Image (cartoon, rainbow, N blue to C red):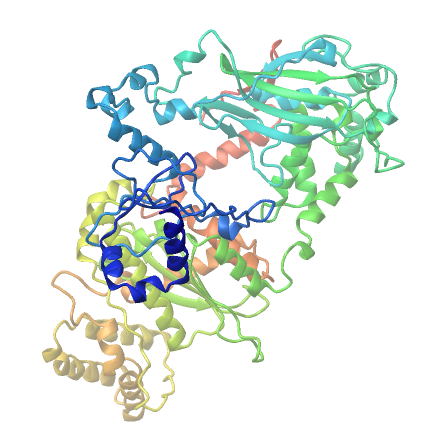
Amino acid sequence: MGHNNGKRHRRNLSGNSNSSNPDRRKKKRKTKSSQIHDSDEYAMDVDSEDEGQEPQPPKAPTLGKAGRQPHSLRSKRRTTPPIAPTSSYHVIPTTPPPPKAKSNKNEAALEYTPRKSRIVQFSLQAPAWQMVDSSPELGGRRAKLNPKKSKREETERPLNKIKHKASHGWENLGECDTTQLFKEFELWKNDYSPHKYDIADSLVNIQYFGHPCDRPKDIRARPFVLEWITDNRKAPKKFKGKPVPVYRATYHCLGNCEYGESVNNKRVDGTDSSDPSDSETSESSDLDKNAADDGGIDKKLNSASVPKRRPLSKKVKCPNSVKIHVEVFSDNLSKAIVYQQNQHRPTRSCYLDMSPFIRQNILELATIADMTSSRIKRRLLKLYEEYETPQHRCPTSEQVNNIVQNVRRKERLLSDPLRAIGVFAEENPEKIFYYSPPDYSTDPPSNFATGIKHPFALQSILLWSSTHGVGLDSSYRHKNENRAPLTFLTTIDENHRMLPGPVFLSGDVTAETLEIFLREVKGLIEDLASGLIKGEIQVESGLESYEEDLLAQARIAILRWDKDNGNESFEPQKRPRLNLSRKHKLLHAVRAVQRCRFLERWDQYMAEFRSQVEDICDGAPVAARDIILYFEANWFCPEWRDLWTDIGLPTGQTRDAMLSTNNWTERAFKTFDQVFLGSRANKSAYRLVLIIANEWFQYYQEWRSTSKRIDKEAFVRAQLAHKVWSSANGIEEVRYGDGRRAWHVANIPT
């Protein structure tokens, strides 16, 4: 039997047995193979029909290549065959399982990961009463031990607490208010550079004071305060009685202590914080006004500072690696504690940098229009007295000039102002509503245009344009060296005071250009009306009292502006010459024609106008005919007639005021030239856009006139105030012992 079985086994391997014995082939189809799992999740086929048959000899396992699998194969999971329901066999696999066959969509395949397959196999054998679901969602035991934390609890984390041990060279220099911390840096006789700023942004928010300029986070240049951003604006309960750091600033010594003396720094709130050379500083901190008044502003500024020297080498490092930590803790957000690691010598005054706080103020003043270096220096002298800046931290006159020149240096900006406007448009989409770059293939460049907007200007147009109309005018004289026309769109309020609308700067003022401008403004007004009705846009400051009227106009939103190509059917007529008395009579006749309200009565008004002109000309037929032809070609033509007469207006409204004259828009240009350009010719188109976007609209929003005429009493009162302020005995300054200052104004009867 064994021999025969061996022969039959060999015939099966050769493949000849199935062809010679058909009964064996049918029997083979009925055999079932079961896949039995082992500890390595492999399976093999076992013939369960013939128990006496000897198993096939085991083959050597196929080993893969040594080393880590490549990424392409590492992502593929090992296919695990379905789990056998029950089996007592435990056979060592000889080869890996075959590749996964295509599964039918209608049949749910039982496929698990290797780890989960063991769990499922155990669950099929274990009783149901032993299975306990401990998932947190179903209220298991684990859910009670580890309750789910809220997102705020998970994110409310302070900074890591640093132990400033004395054994590591740390020393507590004291504490001070966060708003006065910049003064402590000024008193120190060493310079530091910022290295890192850490803040627990999930707990507190930081608010800086002053212009950010080029050092927005430097606490040496900007006073700051911290506030809680929790729901109740208070510290979380878990931090009470356990102060933790919520803000930390790290500064490193610049290394100019190499040019110092042998006296060490001491505590912030103690004594011995200055070197022997500070005796001159303390004595000369109060300016010698008698000596300073003899010279100019430069002499005054130099007398308040110490002459500076350049270091011998720029690549200098602090030999002791001095580090400064400024920390704010949760128990008191208004106090900053200062720590210093290691000691170093104080630097001589001539090698110290100027105060970062003073430098920040110089940069801010230099960005103001028409702010010269001399004006900045005069303001600096007042800052020295107000903040008691040490003399070794005050800049010299030459340093102030260099800072102002660097801020206004043309190399810092784009050489082409038209392209600089494009950069400004990309960075400020809330201020620029249209920009078309210039085409430099033509001479001069063409297709340039930019539109400037402001919420107050748009709401003013929406509020009053339907009642008083709008004015449109262009000007290019003294506006920019490119001679690009500047177009103003204006309206007037109930007091007949001009209010600005959107502004357009373009390469020309053709009908196509104005059509683009008005089309864009029309879209802005429609979007504004929709936003006001939906509550997405708030009423701007200065217009709160008109909120109901503004919403009513938003619902109407009637703005119909069309371009006008003019009337080319009439030849240009020369203006007839008349003396002053006849001109006044002619204006009355034209004003009578303007009151025509219905087109059907136009011929009647024209007949009356001709008779009045003949009376004005005293029967001279040639003069009367020239006047009539002039008005028919330029005023009475269909293109212009409906724009200056009352035809089409509802009852009770006329085209007086802004609808019949452009004086308000002309005055707007004059105000712009005098107030914002200082009666000087502007050169850069980029500067022109900056003035309009940042100053022009805000001027009318903050100081909108509320009366029809100038208040004479307010004018006299302001004039008297200037007189009292400039007088020697009108204002008296008083200083108190705690450093406060006050001004006593003399009681002058009005």
Q: Viewer-proximal residue, 464 or 588?
A: 464
Placement of 525 over or under 229, stated as above or below = below
Identify the residue at horizontal 76%, vertical 25% (top origin): 391
* Left or right placement of residue 728 versus residue 579 in this view: right
Identify the residue at horizontal 32%, vertical 31% (top origin): 119
Residue 464 appears in the figure: no
Query: Picture coordinates of residue 715 (x, y %)?
Result: 43, 40
Q: Viewer-proximal residue, 373 or 215?
A: 215
Q: How many marks?
A: 0
Image quarter (top left, top right, bottom left or bottom right) of the C terminus: top left
Q: Viewer-proximal residue, 189 or 384?
A: 189
Query: Picture coordinates of residue 31 (x, y %)?
Result: 25, 51
Query: Picture coordinates of residue 93 (x, y %)?
Result: 43, 42
Residue positioned most to the bottom? 622
Query: Picture coordinates of residue 588 (x, y %)?
Result: 25, 72
Placement of 158 over or under 538, stated as above or below = above
* Left or right placement of residue 724 versus residue 517 in this view: right
Residue positioned most to the left? 600
Placement of 278 over or under 471, stated as above or below = above
Q: In which quarter of the image is residue 575?
A: bottom left
* Left or right placement of residue 145 versus residue 177 in this view: left
Residue 58 appears in the figure: yes
Identify the residue at horizontal 18%, vertical 69% (top origin): 646
Residue positioned most to the right? 312
Q: Viewer-proximal residue, 592 or 464?
A: 464
Q: In which quarter of the image is residue 324?
A: top right
